[in-house]
């Protein structure tokens, strides 16, 4: 019951949706569309689990006064505040909920994203310290593409931009396709094993 | 310009600088911003899902349209809550299995169509030496073949297979280098955006305080 | 159009027959080799150095008395890379349990939390140490990509894991995490099939698992014959693809387009 029923559910749901890809019959498609909507509903309920996890993990740190427990109070306050504001006053434009998103969350996210400029520089520095032939290929190609994408590339060598286009359209395209095809086969094989119950890690050990 | 806008913009600037301070080292300002963004964003997404998932897809259909069958996924969704109990946590597996079945079932044919067959078709091009495109087609095909040979797991990388696999990994590395080089410029423009925001704040405050 | 064909076409999309045929063949290959493996036929799998490094990383964490950080990417369970990542998490837990090292698993999507909990629990049970399982080490951080990144960076800086294992679907956050991990001196092994992020992992991590290797990881680590059989099936499919590619290109060269047009996706 605890293991077999989930495997049967997974199998039936999976093969029903595989069949939906090939069957254009409107009723069939409509059922599939409806069941697909159900998945979103299941996900929505899982957010209670997420919030529960945050509250459990952080409140224990606070209770035991472990390192950085004061910050955990801040974290939980932010969480509770957003839930109260959202449910109590709505989420539309002009609400405090929306203001906090625009003026606190958004700038922090954007700044975190912009840190990439620094990290890509340090990563590039390491990429160019050539240790192996493979690393050399990566580093040299990266430098060539960087130079070729700015005007100085054309200034140095007139056909530079065309050469970069060639790199993107021939070797890079081949690499992309090889990875894509291989990964897709791996993904399908993994999915198949999940559907038939050969991979059942998600069901735990009891 | 009203005081509220100035205050909110200043808060945004302060938080921006808190995050940037991480580049120096871990410090109380970064910890403050990190915990704030984690708490606020977790609450934000839970609420967004409540308004965009639960209300239109469960509450309204059931209470306003009488579409009672939406209670079925509701029950499945609520099964995930069984994880709060040690004794009943196994019930959540039904919901997990249902969701994974759908997800995998949708993904499998799409992966085959979009990532295998479409790519295969795009690579099956005339190869010849009468014009340059024919040569490039040949190179692309050889690149794909060698890349695929690199991903053979049940054969050792020795002899001809080893040679082709080595060529395959070189092609992959060239591809990675090209990807890296291409992304650099985009990432730097992100930093430029944040610096522009800081500059705009400076202009706004100086204008509010001194009128220029 | 004949009435029979008309009726059939309402029940089968003939434009997708190529997908059905190739998918059917692929399934047949995989099941055939799984059966062979079940019958006890030994199956060879080549060395994947990045995966051997996981054991090395776990050993190092034991020596240093520091935890191991497992990051499963930022996508939900509807992404097959996350599914693969959860399976790998089970294998890694088994390894970690043998060495008595704490395993930290920060998670980006709430629905991944119960799956990760089950995978970790199962790993500890398999290793014979069910009591070592600590539910609090599986932490939901946030759905938001960069809030999650900020949280993971915080863990890297304060808990100083000896090893960072990153397997799953990653996007722009990959480089921020990998560079932060590098700055803390952790051994880093990363694997993804997201083509745009692979260059960053290759540059910033000690070992990178590329594309399909991510999906082969579970079979490689567990050495379970059934799973190794599926790898062999996948290899046969690749061999077939290579033949199709060569044949298709040759026929195209001689002006015969019927073969390649069968693969056209409508």
Image (cartoon, coloured by chain):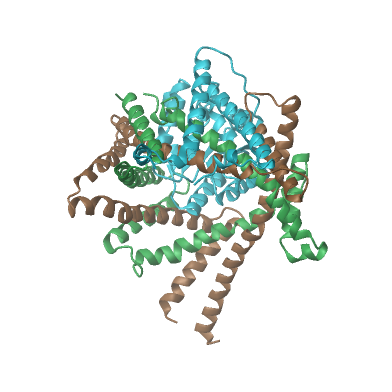
Chain colours: A green, B brown, C cyan
Q: Residue at x 36, y 33 (%)?
A: B97
Q: Is residue B170 left or right of residue C220?
A: right
**Quarter-of-image position of residue C7:** top left
Q: Position of residue A62 (x, y in %)?
A: 39, 46
Closer-to-camera residue (B156/A161): A161
Image quadrant containing the N terminus of chain C: top left
Is C21 placed above or below A119 here?
above
**Quarter-of-image position of residue A84:** bottom left
User: From where the camera sits, is residue C54 visible?
Assistant: no
Q: Position of residue A176 (x, y in %)?
A: 63, 44
Q: Position of residue A188 (x, y in %)?
A: 50, 34
Q: Residue at x 63, y 43 (%)?
A: B123
Q: Position of residue B77 (x, y in %)?
A: 29, 41
Closer-to-camera residue (C72/B67): B67
Q: Is residue C52 left or right of residue B74?
A: right
Q: Is residue A43 left or right of residue C66?
A: left
Judged from this view, the residue extending furthest toward the bottom is B211
Q: Residue at x 55, y 49 (%)?
A: C171
User: From where the camera sits, is residue A129 visible?
Assistant: yes
């Amino acid at each position: 019951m605890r293991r077999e029923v989930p495997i049967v559910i997974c199998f039936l749901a999976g093969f029903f949706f595989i069949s939906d890809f090939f069957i254009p019959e409107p009723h069939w498609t409509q059922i599939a569309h409806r069941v697909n909507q159900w998945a979103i509903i299941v996900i929505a309920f899982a957010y209670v689990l997420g919030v529960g996890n945050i509250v459990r993990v952080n409140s224990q740190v606070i209770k035991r006064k472990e390192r950085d427990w004061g910050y955990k109070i801040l974290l939980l306050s932010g969480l509770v505040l957003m839930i109260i504001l959202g449910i109590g006053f709505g989420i539309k434009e002009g609400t405090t909920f929306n203001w906090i998103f625009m003026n606190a969350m958004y700038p922090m996210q954007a700044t975190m994203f912009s840190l990439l400029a620094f990290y890509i520089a340090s990563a590039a520095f390491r990429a160019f310290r050539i240790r192996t032939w493979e690393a050399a290929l990566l580093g040299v190609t990266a430098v060539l593409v960087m130079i070729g994408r700015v005007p100085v590339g054309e200034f140095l060598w007139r056909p530079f931009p065309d050469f970069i286009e060639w790199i993107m359209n021939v070797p890079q395209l081949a690499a992309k396709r090889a990875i894509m095809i291989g990964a897709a086969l791996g993904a399908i094989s993994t999915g198949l094993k999940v559907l038939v119950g050969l991979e059942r890690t998600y069901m735990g050990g009891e | 310009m009203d005081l509220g806008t100035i205050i909110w913009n200043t808060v945004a600037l302060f938080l921006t600088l808190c995050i940037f301070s991480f580049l120096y080292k871990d410090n109380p300002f970064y910890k403050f911003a990190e915990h704030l963004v984690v708490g606020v964003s977790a609450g934000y997404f839970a609420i967004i899902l409540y308004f965009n998932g639960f209300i239109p897809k469960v509450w309204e259909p059931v209470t306003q349209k009488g579409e009672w069958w939406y209670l079925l996924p509701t029950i499945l969704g609520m099964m995930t809550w069984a994880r709060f109990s040690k004794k009943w946590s196994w019930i959540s597996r039904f919901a997990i299995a249902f969701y994974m079945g759908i997800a995998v079932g949708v993904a499998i044919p799409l992966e085959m169509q979009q990532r295998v067959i479409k790519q295969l078709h795009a690579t099956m091009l005339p190869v010849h030496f009468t014009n340059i495109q024919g040569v490039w087609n040949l190179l692309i095909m050889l690149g794909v073949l060698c890349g695929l040979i690199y991903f053979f797991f049940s054969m050792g990388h020795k002899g001809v297979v080893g040679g082709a696999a080595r060529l395959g990994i070189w092609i992959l590395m060239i591809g990675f280098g090209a990807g890296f080089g291409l992304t650099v410029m985009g990432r730097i423009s992100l930093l430029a955006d944040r610096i522009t925001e800081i500059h705009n704040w400076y202009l706004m405050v100086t204008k509010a305080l001194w009128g220029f | 159009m004949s009435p029979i064909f008309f009726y059939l076409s309402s029940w089968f999309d003939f434009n997708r027959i190529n997908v059905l045929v190739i998918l059917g063949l692929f399934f047949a290959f995989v099941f055939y080799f799984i059966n062979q493996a079940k019958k006890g036929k030994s199956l060879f799998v080549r060395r994947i150095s990045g995966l051997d490094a996981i054991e090395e990383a776990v050993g190092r964490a034991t020596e240093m008395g520091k935890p191991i950080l497992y990051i499963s990417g930022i996508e939900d369970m509807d992404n097959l890379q996350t599914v693969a990542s959860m399976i790998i998490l089970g294998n890694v837990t088994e390894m970690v349990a043998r060495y008595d090292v704490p395993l930290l698993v920060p998670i980006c999507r709430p629905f991944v939390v119960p799956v990760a909990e089950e995978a970790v629990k199962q790993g500890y049970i398999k290793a014979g140490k069910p009591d070592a399982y600590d539910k609090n080490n599986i932490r939901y951080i946030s759905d938001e990509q960069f809030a999650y990144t900020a949280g993971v960076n915080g863990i890297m800086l304060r808990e100083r894991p000896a090893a960072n294992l990153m397997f799953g679907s990653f996007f722009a956050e990959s480089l921020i995490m990998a560079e932060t991990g590098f700055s803390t001196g952790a051994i880093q092994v990363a694997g993804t099939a997201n083509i745009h992020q692979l260059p960053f992992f290759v540059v910033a991590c000690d070992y990178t698992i590329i594309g399909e290797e991510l999906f082969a990881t579970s079979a490689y680590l567990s050495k379970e014959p059934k799973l190794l059989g599926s790898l062999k099936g996948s290899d046969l499919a690749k061999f077939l693809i290579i033949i199709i590619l060569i044949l298709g290109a040759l026929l195209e060269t001689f002006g015969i387009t019927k073969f390649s047009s069968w693969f056209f996706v409508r």
